[in-house]
Image: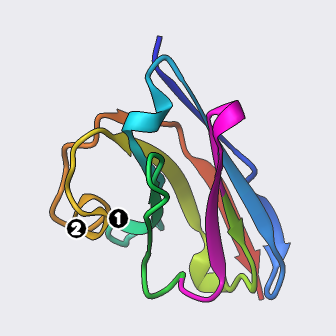
Amino acid sequence: DVQLQASGGGEVQAGGSLRLSCAASGFFFDDYAIGWFRQAPGKEREGVSAIKIRDGTTYYADSAKGRFTIVTDNAKNTVYLQMNSLQPDDTAVYYCAADKSEYELGYLFGLDYYGMDYWGKGTQVTVSS
């Protein structure tokens, strides 16, 4: 069975850090782009960061640049999102997702693409001021 197991959410104070994990199973990891969306109550879904496993190409939303880092552990079929300098605006449910298409990451994880192959369950991130 295909699984994307997301973990690592929690509650931190502003300025703190969290590391999210997305463990993949049931599909050939190297063929996919994997990344993170987030959605806060009353707000639109936002693509935060993504990586193409095969070549390491990365994508960061403007809100994530300079604060978040996405890396993979190919031996564990896991993608990590290190989030530093967290702010209350980062509060949201974070979902990892995977797609095999060759589209550019900014499009896959943008507002207009709704064809992601696989989704994980969300993990809550809460940042208090």
Residue highlighted by disc 1: 45
For residue 93, which quarter of the picture?
Answer: bottom right
Asked if the residues shown at circle 1 and circle 2 are in contact, with their CB atoms under 8 angstroms apart, the answer is yes
Q: What stretch is highlighted in magenta?
A: 65-80
Q: Which element type, helix, strand or loop, lies under badge 2?
A: loop
Mark 1 or 2: the one toward you: 2
The furthest residue to the top: 1
Residue toward you, 77 or 11: 77
Residue 29 seen by the camera: yes
Residue highlighted by disc 2: 111
Residue toward you, 26 or 43: 26
Residue 37 seen by the camera: no
Asked if the magenta segment contains residue 75, the reply would be yes
Q: Which residue is drawn at 84% across and 80% down?
A: 16
Pick the quarter of the image with the C terminus.
bottom right
Dot 1: within a 10 Å radius of its alpha carbon, few (fewer than 14), some, or many (20 or more) residues? some
Q: Residue at x 43, y 64 (%)?
A: 57
Q: Which of marks 1 and 2 is nearer the N terminus?
A: 1
Task: State the image coordinates of residue 96 (x, y, percent, origin top left).
Answer: 50, 47
**Is residue 13 placed above or below 71 in the rendered structure?**
below
Task: State the image coordinates of residue 4 (x, y, percent, origin top left).
Answer: 53, 32
Task: Identify which amino acid the numbered label 1 is placed on.
Answer: Arg
**Is residue 114 placed above or below 77 in the rendered structure?**
below
